Image (cartoon, rainbow, N blue to C red):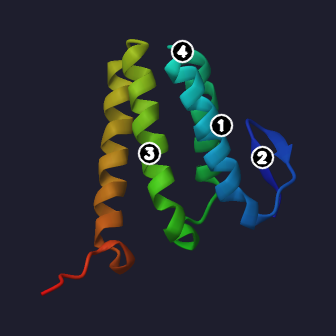
Amino acid sequence: MKWSLFNKPLDIDISEVPVVLFELHENSLLFMDSEEWDRALLLLQKAQSLIEQLNIENFKRDRLIIVIIFHNTALCHQMLGSLEEAAIFLETAVLNLEILSLLPEFQQVEVK
């Protein structure tokens, strides 16, 4: 399948998508550490562009990185003063986290 980031073709296999998401997120953290919020936000927006093209149900294992991407996007918007955008992304992160907690593979088994 052909993917794109900001209308630029991206030639990667579907199995590589989680790696690309992880790398975009990791690099955004470097910018966040140096308080370059606009540059971090750009990388997170690229990750979101890729997420929007996914069938999320096929990526249950990778849902947590998606939640973290939405959370960190909210943080960047907050630090840049875009509080309405921050609230939207934080709500999206929380909703996805709630969905994740309902999945059997993320529920803990009680040990007695």
Residue 43's place in the image compared with 62, above or below, is above
Q: Going from the N terminus, do you reach mark 3 or mark 1 first?
A: 1
In the rendered structure, find residue 46 and report the number of the disc placed on it. 1
Tell me how far mark 2 sits from mark 1, CA to CA. 9 Å
Q: Answer whether labels 2 and 1 touch (C-beta < 8 Å).
A: no
Name which residue lies at 37% across and 56% down.
96
Tell me the amino acid under the disc marked 2: Ser
Question: Can you give x and y, in whole percent of width and height, for residue 22 in the image?
Answer: 62, 48
Say which residue label 3 marks: 68
In 3D space, how far apart are the residues under numbered discs 1 and 4 (Cα atoms)? 19 Å
- The secondary element bearing badge 1 is classed as helix
Q: Earlier in the sequence, mark 3 or mark 4?
A: 4
Looking at numbered disc 3 in the image, what kind of residue is underneath it?
Answer: Ile
Q: Are marks 3 and 4 in contact (CB under 8 Å)?
A: no
Q: Residue 53's x, y, as percent?
A: 65, 55
- Name the residue located 58 percent from the left edge and 21 percent from the top edge: 31
Using the rendered view, name the quadrant where residue 34 is placed. Answer: top right
Q: Of the numbered discs in the image, which one, if any, rests on residue 4? A: 2
Q: For mark 4, give the secondary structure.
A: loop
Question: Mark 4 — residue?
Answer: 34
Nearest to viewer (mark 3 / mark 2):
3
- Residue 2 at x, y = what percent? 83, 57
Q: Report the quarter where the C terminus lies.
A: bottom left
Quadrant housing the N terminus: bottom right
Give the amino acid at mark 4.
Ser
Q: Compare marks 2 and 4 and give the one earlier in the sequence.
A: 2
